[in-house]
Image (cartoon, grey):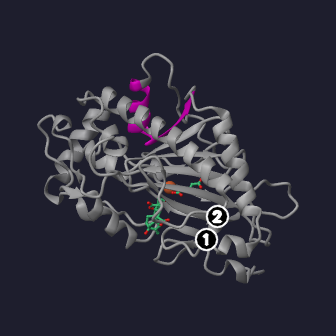
């Protein structure tokens, strides 16, 4: 029997079994934000998948293209220049290491703090002013999109006021919300791999915030786990012109589990000279102010008990940054006594 050794450079990066052909999520809902009943479509997509794409979003292509070009330029710059904005702790330039607890992936990235509507002066920022300006312009567009999506979620769920969720992330008054922006670059992995194996680009996880808005170039790699079906993984076909919205853990709690955060991961492309493109993605993470209390909204309880105990975003974030990527970060906040009964309730509600 031939045992293929794992190349040394991949020592700490998990390999994933990738049965070919990958099943693609042909059913990934694409919501036309300018179409009729967009709010209803958004809520149904969030309930079924915790994930959907938006088209006719009104974000000018120029804003996206400019950032993509600057991101490509940054990642192509000399390693020493990139290292000058690192190591990521958690903000700055990082390579292969994700977070502080041993997660590794075949990628490099820039993780940046956003203060209201621009890069925070308090965290390391890239030295290129063209990149900084492109990020600032893009972040303004993402705040607008996050606001629209969260207003539609509130509207579709019957939560009032309509801005109740959106204000947590993009509210103009009160404490500044906790927004993060990330550029990820996944070069194709040039090393030989055992058959039916791929390299982990970004390991499976849910995002802790309310919503994340992701955009990538035309390179594939993103996969999401279905809520039913034993969490089967499906590939998301790339779409340069769309944005992908993830429901995060905090929105799951605020809706008392009616919307569920989506587990997702990125699989790196493999094979040198195979013509595979590098994947470049840009993700805006919409979190609330640190002191924001996160608990099921009373309006959504309809007489049933809360599935989670109240916590502040600051508390949750602290716990999240102590956890591994794949951990179930919500488990310690679940209300054990009512979980079984409520599960039954939801089950009936959905079937
Ligand atoms: C391993 C980790 C990386 C992460 C912080 C954490 O300890 C667990 C959550 C991770 C995550 C996932 C979504 C976002 O990419 C991120 C910035 C976030 O807010 O939570 C990352 C964190 C990170 O890369 O530092
Ligand atoms: O890079 C991607 O496409 C997704 C990465 C991701 O899920 C994250 O950064 O939280
Ligand atoms: Fe993510």
Secondary structure category for the residue under label 1: loop
Q: Nearer the viewer, mark 2 or mark 1?
A: 2
27 in relation to 209, above or below: above
Residue 187 in view, yes or no:
no
Which residue appears farthest toward the top when viewing the image? Answer: 36
200 sits to left or right of 88: right
Q: Is residue 54 magenta?
A: yes
Location of residue 55 by image quarter: top right
- Distance from Cα at disc 2 to Cα at disc 1: 8 Å
Residue 82 in view, yes or no:
yes
The residue where tag 1 is placed is 85
146 in relation to 4, above or below: above
101 in relation to 231, above or below: below
The residue where tag 2 is placed is 127
Pick the front one: 100 or 174: 174
Q: Residues within 10 Å of mark 1 (few under 14, many from 20)?
A: some
Nearer the N terminus, badge 2 or badge 1? 1
Pick the front one: 80 or 240: 80
Q: Residue 21's spot in the image, x, y percent?
A: 71, 49
Image mark for residue 349:
none
Q: Residue 251's spot in the image, x, y percent?
A: 33, 46
Q: Is residue 44 magenta?
A: yes
The magenta stretch spans which residues?
A: 39-55
Quadrant for the C terminus, please.
top left
Q: Residue 172's spot in the image, x, y percent?
A: 33, 40
For the point 33% across and 41% down, the residue is: 171
For the point 76% across and 65% down, the residue is: 77
Quadrant for the N terminus, please.
bottom right
Location of residue 72 by image quarter: bottom right
For the residues labelled 2 and 1, say whether their Cβ atoms are less than 8 Å apart: yes
């Amino acid at each position: 029997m031939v045992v293929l050794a794992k190349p040394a450079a991949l020592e700490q990066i998990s390999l994933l079994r990738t049965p070919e052909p990958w099943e693609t999520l042909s059913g990934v809902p694409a919501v036309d934000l300018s179409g009729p009943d967009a709010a209803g479509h958004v809520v149904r997509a969030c309930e079924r998948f915790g994930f959907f794409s938006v088209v006719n979003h009104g974000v000018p292509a120029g804003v996206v293209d400019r950032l993509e070009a600057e991101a490509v330029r940054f990642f192509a710059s000399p390693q020493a220049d990139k290292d000058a904005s690192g190591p990521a702790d958690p903000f700055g330039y990082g390579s292969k290491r994700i977070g502080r607890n041993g997660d590794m992936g075949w990628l490099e990235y820039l993780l940046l703090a956003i203060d209201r509507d621009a890069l925070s002066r308090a965290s390391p920022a890239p030295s290129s002013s063209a990149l900084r300006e492109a990020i600032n312009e893009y972040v303004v567009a993402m705040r607008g999109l996050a606001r629209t999506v969260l207003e539609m979620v509130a509207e579709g769920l019957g939560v009032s006021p309509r801005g109740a969720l959106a204000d947590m992330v993009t509210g103009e008054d009160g404490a500044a919300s906790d927004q993060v922006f990330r550029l990820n670059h996944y070069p194709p992995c040039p090393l030989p791999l055992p058959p039916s194996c791929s390299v982990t680009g970004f390991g499976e996880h849910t995002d802790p915030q309310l919503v994340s808005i992701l955009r990538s170039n035309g390179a594939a790699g993103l996969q999401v786990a279905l809520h039913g079906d034993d969490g089967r993984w499906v590939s998301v076909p790339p779409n340069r012109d769309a944005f992908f919205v993830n429901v995060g853990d905090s929105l799951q709690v605020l809706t008392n589990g009616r919307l569920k955060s989506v587990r997702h991961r990125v699989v790196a492309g493999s094979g040198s000279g195979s013509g595979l493109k590098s994947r470049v993605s840009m993700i805006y993470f919409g979190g609330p102010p640190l002191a924001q209390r996160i608990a099921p909204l009373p309006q959504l309880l309809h007489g049933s008990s809360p599935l989670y105990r109240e916590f502040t975003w600051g508390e949750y974030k602290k716990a999240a940054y102590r956890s591994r990527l794949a951990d179930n970060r919500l488990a310690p906040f679940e209300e054990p006594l009512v979980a079984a009964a409520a599960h039954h309730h939801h089950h009936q509600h959905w079937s």
